[in-house]
Amino acid sequence: MRRLPLDVCPVRGGRQPEQVLVRGCWRRVENVVDHWRETGRWWKGESLRDFFLVETNRGDLVVSKGQASWRVERLID
Amino acid sequence: MFVHLHMHTPFSFLDGVSPINGLVQRAAEMNMPVLAMTDHNSLSGAVQFHRACHQAGIKPIIGAEVTVEGGHHLTLLAKNRQGYANLCQLLTAAHLGNERGYPKAAERMLREYTEDIIALSGCWHSDVFSLAYQRRYQQAEAATKKYRDIFGQHNFYIELQETFYPRQHATNKALAEIAQKLPVPVVASGNIHYVDKSMFRIQDVLTCVRTLTTVDEPHPQRKINAEFYFKSPQQMEELFFWVPQALDNTVQIAEQCQDYELTNDKYLPRFDTSGQSPIQLLRHLTYKGAQQRYKRLNAKIKSRLEYELGIIEQLGFADYFLVVWDVAREARQRGVRYAGRGSAADSAVAYCLYITDVDAVARNLSFERFINPERGNNLPDIDIDFDARYRDDIAEYVTEKYGEDRVATVCTFQTYHARGAIRDIAKALGFPPEEIDRLARIMPYISANNIDEAFEIFPELRDSQLPIYKYRQLFDLCSQAAGLPRHIGTHLGGVIISGQPLNTISPLQQAAKGCRIIQFDKVDVEDLHLLKLDLLCLRMLSAVQDTITSTPKQLDFNSIPLDDKPTYSLLNSAETAGAFQLESPAQRNLQSRLQADNIEDIVASVALIRPGPIKGNMVEPFLARRHGQEPVTYVDPRLEDILKDTYGIVLFQEQVIEIAVKIAGFTPGEADQLRRALTHHRDKGQMQAIGKDFIRKAIQRGCPREVAETIFSYIEGYAGYGFCEAHAAAFGDTGYKTAYLLTHYPAHFYAALLSNQPMGYFPAHTLINEAQRRGIKVLGPDVNCSQAHFTVQNDAIRVGLKQVKEMPKALLDRIVKGQPYEDLLQFMRQIRPPVNVAQNLALCGALDRFDANRRRVLWQVSVHRPARQPQLNLQQAAELANIEDFTDQQKCCYEWDILGFSPSWHPLQFVRPELSDAGVLTIQQVKRRRPSGTAKVAGLLIRPHRPPTRSGRTVVFFTLEDETGLLDVTVFENIYEQYGKEIFTSSLLLVEGRLDPRGTPAMIAYYASSLS
């Protein structure tokens, strides 16, 4: 499991992720395996994020959605 | 439809963070007909929850989240009163069968107390869920079967929660499959910890407090999100759409649970009367005591006793009186000094049973203030003070007599105020300890939700230059924690005696001090109609006992004459530091102006210096009328009978009741409600409602409106806390008698007071100073002459060795037993004190008799250690001979550090020359300068405080102490605004002001500066 730089990858989707951009390629989300919610380090100003463990056509990923942005959290090799 | 069956209240300490009323209100807003509470191993919230639900028209289900073997959680709900009793017994076994603070219900306990209990498999921390989460499905299935076997096919449910945790949903699906396979029903739950998501932060921080971590440290008990809020049925339906039977089952469970009363008349204990009826025995004992107390029983006494006995019989309180009589009798037989206090002294029966020493007949006290026939079966309060050293022995006697299973101590709940909240929450947020200490120390005793405002109001905070921008988040969290209970504690005096095993009424648990406590506080206990005796510690009674046993002449405290002129002279001189209830600045000032010459004056003065009479502006009129400087008048002639003994002033709660009955025709029950409204600081709206009622009824009874309004203004002015006459009489009597001891046996009394510290208004150093000022020599500690406590030796007070810091008791006993010691070598060889204690003994002068050079003794006990190495080498001998002693100032500092005072020097002595050069007078010089003028004075600052005032403006009072005496200082608001920081943060203060010509020597300050 590798952690990616936070600003790398946009994600397309509404309430759930549909496509994730990894290293210039869009991966299609085939299945949302898990969904959880974390409040983060609220005492440092972080806000709530929804996390998704997803299966894509080219491997598994953890992506998260905050108030305004999607983020890829982990790439699971 | 959905019902919440898993909800934590604040009695899941440092976990549930929404007040019970808020949770119930949210359920009512969502039209939920039923609601359950399930705190961690506790039913402490049950009475409040029960009451709040009934007020909201909701059926309460009482349950608990019980910790079982392996630390796993299990949710249990009581179906009915029997189930509740079983839950109490299970929790009691879980608490008492394990280490304190770590309750755990073993499987055999679960099997024993399953009747009328419904069990849900529990939360994330349950064994069923955690096994399924670990994909150990077979073990999860086995655990499920075990619980089904314990609780029965229809009483065990697999609990499903959807709180957006990783892999939670998948685990829930696996659990649903297990449930279908076995089969076991499933049930949905919310695991509520707070009403709104916004309270997640305080819940998280308090979890850190509970787990002794900071927010930056991960801990498995911290929740990762804000999903533990009170979800609506619609939200729950959305979350559990895939398993609708889990929602339906909540309703089915709710239907199985009955609404039942927690109270029961059988809770009252029965006193063993050996075949007689309780009232017969009570009557017999009352009349026997009456013969001893009164000698001749006249019609008035008989009629009063019959009246009281009639009400006691009617309300079924005879057993209660017999229980208390028995406790008092036992104390007398053991020679333990005690005194009944409070409204019990309104009862002639209590007087005849020797429960109290106030003659209710002679004082014409109102029995209804003690027992109100209209209060139904609400048990009256009987409070007894005992010599503090033996109070626990008496409590043990009660336990032995009624059985360990029927006696326990009432609990208390320590709730968050500003100071405690700052300490806990700042620590959890990772603030450095020194910063936390600085912030907490400066905080006045205020609610935790007023801290921001306090920085605007209190000068000591406003001028503190603390960077409050750094504390915004901290203060915000503190305000959310305001009033939440932090942990369960032990009530100082409240002992419950029950007619049936207590573990069927409340869970019992072990307290830190070793006794058993129930999980309800005194308010809940009253609601449950449990019999509570307040067996309180009063150190003053210990001091009285010590004085009496140490004086050469055997004194009978109870027979001290109440007309002793020297005692009244002392009271009038206001030099009463140490006298019970008569030593505060306000009391001393009152005494000097009152010039009391009889015990009734003392009783009145005890009642006058209370928030109620002070805010009601009753002190000045009372004094003026007492001295004939103002006529005693009554707006209604009917008031004369009620108020003539107090010069037309409403001083006692009994008078309020009598006025309400006589003028407005209130029934005793209505009048008692009025008294409760006055004494419990009810809101203005309630007072206005009672006022309207009073005025309306008074007018109906022929009282002109203006007169009725004036009379009610007397009552209203009394609002706040005031004494009942019976209590004032009991305290006044003890106060006067301690003043007698102070007058005639000052050395013995001061020694006794010092031995029983902490107690009273003044700290030990002030009492030492006062004793010295009165010409009593105070001798320092001495390993050859000192006993454990302070003693009187040749009319001088000898400091006890117990006063020495860090002195272990066993060592102390050994030192006293081995006296006398020939020299330091023998002392060190024989006693072998630890280095720290030996050093403290050297530094406080307790080894002076061997060598007056304390630095040399210190060197010997810490470096040389003569016990180990009796012979010095030449170099050591030379060094020893040349050691220079400490200066007097250094010795004084060490004595303060080790003893808490210096018997040899007052700290002000060392700066007196400089102070004199600066025009600062001693307190003695100030007193000579009275009655007018201005002065500068410096001293140790004692007890700065801001009592309530009639105007609502802040007035600060404190006492200054220098080597020549005490001076009371008053600071009005405008000066406090300028110098509040100095007053509340200094230990040594310079004050300039004008001398107050009234009463005791006092000063009204216009300048203050710290000399610390």
Image (spheres, coloured by chain):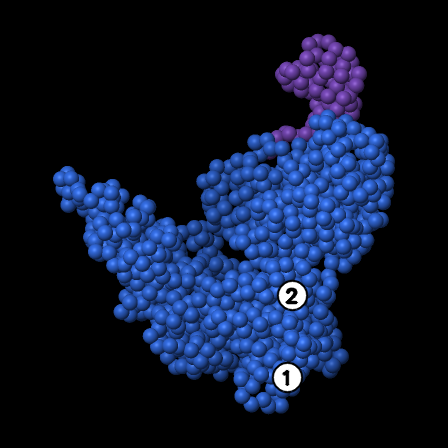
Chain colours: A purple, B blue
Q: In the displayed structure, does residue B152 sit left or right of residue B535? A: right
Q: Count the marks: how many?
A: 2
- Residue type highlighted by circle 1: Arg
Q: Which residue matches tag 1? A: B304
Given residues B824 and B840, the one toward you in this image is B824
Give the quadrant of the N terminus of chain B.
top right
Percent x, y for residue B781? 29, 58
Q: Which residue matches tag 2? A: B531
Give the mark nearer the N terminus: 2 vs 1.
1
Q: Give the quadrant of residue A21.
A: top right
Label 2: state its secondary structure: strand
Label 1: state its secondary structure: helix
Q: In the displayed structure, does residue B263 sit left or right of residue B355? A: right
Numbered badge on residue B656: none
Residue at position x 59%, y 49% in the image: B487
Residue B446 seen anywhere in this rendered image of the structure = no
Against B80, is A65 above or below?
above
Percent x, y for residue B601? 48, 78
- Residue type highlighted by circle 2: Leu
Residue B67 seen anywhere in this rendered image of the structure = yes
